[in-house]
């Protein structure tokens, strides 16, 4: 029987899908890399199902050989996996795209609205007894109707954010480094701009790029200084896309007006000073955190695992070239 190891327990229907076909073990916590490697050497598995906090390095992949054929990740972002190392070792890597697009776009809009309209700052004031009653100039924020939203990275999630923002009367521009196909319903309603122009003209910037060497600190001090002082930055992608230390200065010194963040450079730590920034709305990596979305992610993670066990390239494989020379035979 095939062997599958999850680092954390995954929600239904993961187990009911995998159990008939494999013996399933769950570590139950995020173990240090060396311990996970030890475990893989002691109990070889065919499929490893980690989540986004498990670093899947070349050394860890080596520990899984010769049996490990697939890393079936419970996430869409796969920056924690050394995909090149996996490909060299003929290990398929799969993720869970598509099913978390809407939930993540909703979370992005929640942060955008809260940051632009100072909802969390107002919540804190109301709780602290600092609300003295309605006043003409109390806690004014940004008018979103007619404002320009700059979407950096225009894949599924970026486009889902644009679609929602159009409903709020925002104008949309985007920048992208890769060829994108724009969904028919928003075509003609979005404009492409070079990133420098996007940063310097947008009222709101929202980040939807994967974390790669090229996007690490894409939003650095220079980028932040080029943004409008009235602007809002939203990040639901990956923390290291933003230089968080520079962002704290930007928020403190008014280079930008506010930020809405779901992801952080060194999760779960926050950069020194960020907590004190009242103009930052901080959510704890909740982009895909709905019951329905997490279940859909579990289903895809299971399906990708079963594909690999059966010797089929996983449905959502990010490195199909890993099995270019032929898929391994089904595990009997
Ligand atoms: C969440 O951040 C994911 O990549 O699935
Ligand atoms: C991620 O799923 C994206 O394509 O934006």
Image (cartoon, grey):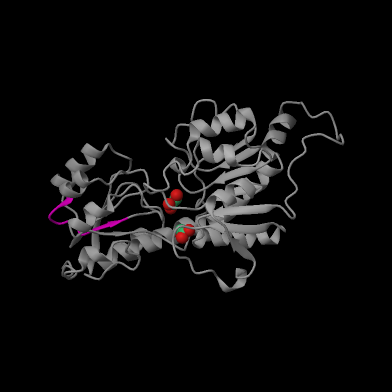
Judge from the rendering whether residue 175 lies leftward or rightward of residue 114; answer left or right.
left
Seen from this angle, which residue lies furthest bottom? 184
The answer to which image quadrant residue 326 occupies is: bottom left
Residue 64, x across and y down, in percent: 17, 50
| Res 320 visible | yes
Residue 9, x across and y down, in percent: 36, 49
**What are the residue bounds of the magenta stretch?**
64-72
Residue 117, x across and y down, in percent: 72, 43
Which residue is drawn at the image coordinates 34% and 54% (left, top)?
73
Q: In terms of depth relative to the viewer, which is nearer, 106 or 173?
A: 173
Residue 167, x across and y down, in percent: 69, 61
Looking at the picture, does residue 105 appear above or below residue 276?
below
Q: Quadrant of the C terminus?
A: bottom left
Q: In terms of depth relative to the viewer, which is nearer, 75 or 186?
A: 186
Is residue 133 rendered magenta in the image?
no
Q: Quadrant of the N terminus?
A: bottom left
Which residue is drawn at the image coordinates 86% and 34% (left, top)?
135
Judge from the rendering whether residue 186 lies leftward or rightward of residue 28; answer left or right.
right
Which residue is drawn at the image coordinates 30% and 66% (left, top)?
314
| Res 46 visible | no
Looking at the picture, does residue 218 appear above or below residue 323?
above
Judge from the rendering whether residue 318 lies leftward or rightward of residue 222; answer left or right.
left
Q: In terms of depth relative to the viewer, which is nearer, 69 or 220?
A: 220
């Amino acid at each position: 029987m095939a062997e599958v190891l999850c680092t954390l327990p995954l929600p239904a229907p993961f187990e009911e899908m995998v159990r008939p076909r494999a013996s399933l073990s769950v570590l139950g916590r995020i173990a240090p890399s060396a311990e996970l490697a030890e475990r893989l050497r002691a109990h070889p598995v065919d499929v490893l199902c980690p989540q986004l906090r498990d670093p899947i390095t070349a050394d860890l992949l080596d520990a899984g050989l010769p049996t490990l054929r697939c890393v079936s990740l419970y996430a869409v972002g796969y920056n924690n996996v050394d995909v090149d190392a996996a490909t060299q070792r003929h290990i398929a890597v799969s993720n869970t795209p598509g099913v978390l697009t809407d939930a993540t776009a909703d979370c992005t809009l929640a942060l955008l609205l809260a940051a632009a309209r100072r909802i969390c700052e107002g919540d804190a004031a109301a709780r602290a007894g600092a609300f003295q009653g309605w006043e003409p100039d109390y806690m004014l924020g940004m008018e979103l109707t007619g404002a320009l939203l700059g979407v950096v990275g225009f894949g599924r999630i970026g486009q889902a954010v644009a679609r929602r923002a159009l409903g709020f009367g925002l104008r949309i521009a985007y920048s992208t480094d890769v060829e994108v196909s724009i969904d028919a319903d928003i075509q003609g309603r979005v404009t492409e701009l070079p990133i420098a122009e996007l940063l310097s003209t947008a009222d709101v910037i929202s980040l939807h790029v994967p974390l790669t060497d090229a996007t690490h600190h894409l939003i650095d001090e220079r980028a932040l200084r080029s943004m409008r002082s009235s602007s809002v930055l939203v990040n639901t992608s990956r923390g290291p896309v933003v230089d968080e230390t520079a962002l704290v200065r930007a928020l403190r010194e008014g280079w930008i007006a506010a930020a809405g963040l779901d992801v952080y450079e060194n999760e779960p730590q926050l950069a020194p000073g960020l907590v004190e920034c009242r103009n930052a709305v901080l959510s704890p990596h909740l982009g895909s955190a709905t019951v329905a979305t997490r279940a859909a992610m579990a289903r895809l993670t299971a399906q990708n695992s079963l594909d690999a066990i059966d010797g089929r390239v996983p449905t959502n494989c990010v490195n199909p070239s890993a099995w270019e020379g032929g898929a391994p035979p089904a595990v009997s």
